[in-house]
Image (cartoon, rainbow, N blue to C red):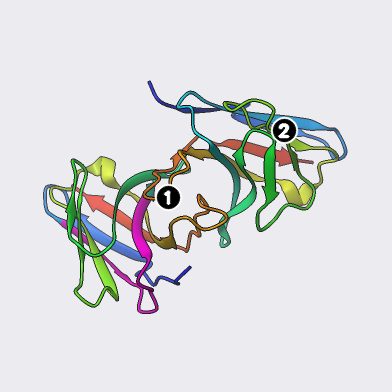
Amino acid sequence: EAQVTQNPRYLITVTGKKLTVTCSQNMNHEYMSWYRQDPGLGLRQIYYSMNVEVTDKGDVPEGYKVSRKEKRNFPLILESPSPNQTSLYFCASSRRQGGTDTQYFGPGTRLTVL
Amino acid sequence: DAKTTQPPSMDCAEGRAANLPCNHSTISGNEYVYWYRQIHSQGPQYIIHGLKNNETNEMASLIITEDRKSSTLILPHATLRDTAVYYCIVRVHGSSNTGKLIFGQGTTLQVKP
């Protein structure tokens, strides 16, 4: 089954404790992206990757890092989490084409930083 | 990418057609109209997209006006499981950030028994 998986699905942590949220897709997609969703602000893009070893900032990259060492994986790293990073996070992937490219989203990771 | 305007909420009776409008009066010629939905904090789900012709798939139909300034998503026989937030998004293909989606506030569709 074609899917995007994220782990963990729920995480409660404390300020400053480094964490990684993993994202994996099994569709051989070139493009992957991270979004965060906050009440009243909608979904905003954090980082994206056009292919292996190619990453770039989205609209709200501060406090986050990413890496793309393999095509299928795109982890989101919070080196020193802060309470304002409490949010619902989604990973997404799509085939990079010049034409239409349907985007597939993971189930989400709900992060609480105390 | 062009801005979209959607009503904040709509109700629909179960089994009836749900017609969700979207205005995108500043859309340019190379921008597509996409619809996604999000069910209760799950990951957004792609529904349908189009450029200027009407489109239909197993989930819905998309009607785009001739001037492309507005569109309507039609769920032909809404069920309770269609209760969700529906997002209308317009974007250019082939830009430097080809996958970026700009989500507005969407329309919360409540399907009632």
Q: Is residue B19 left or right of residue A77?
A: left
Vertically, is B39 above or below A18?
below
Give the x, y percent position of residue A61.
73, 52
Q: Are marks 1 and 2 on the same chain?
A: yes
Badge 2: residue crowd in 10 Å (few <14, some 14–19, many ≥20): few
Tell me the residue that label 2 is attached to. A12
**Chain ID at mark 2:** A
Q: Is residue B16 visible?
A: yes
> In this picture, which residue range is highlighted in magenta?
B18-36
**Chain ID at mark 1:** A
SS type, badge 1: loop
Mark 1 touches mark 2? (CB < 8 Å) = no
SS type, badge 2: strand
Q: Is residue B56 left or right of residue A58?
A: left
Vertically, is B79 above or below A28?
below
Give the x, y percent position of residue B86.
36, 55
The disc placed on residue A98 is 1
Give the x, y percent position of residue A100.
36, 49
Write down the quadrant of residue A89 in the picture: top right
Residue B35 inside the magenta-drawn segment:
yes
Instruction: Pick whichever, B83 or B22, lies toward us.
Output: B22
Instruction: Pick whichever, B13 or B98, lies toward us.
Output: B98
Q: Is residue B39 visible?
A: no
The disc placed on residue A50 is none
Provide the major secondary structure of the magenta segment: strand
Q: Residue at x 24, y 43 (%)?
A: B80
Instruction: Pick whichever, B46 or A108, lies toward us.
Output: B46
Write down the quadrant of residue B106 in the picture: bottom left
Q: Is residue A14 left or right of residue B8?
A: right
N-term mark: 1 or 2: 2
Q: Looking at numbered disc 2 in the image, what kind of residue is underneath it?
A: Ile
- Residues under labels 1 and 2: Cα distance? 40 Å
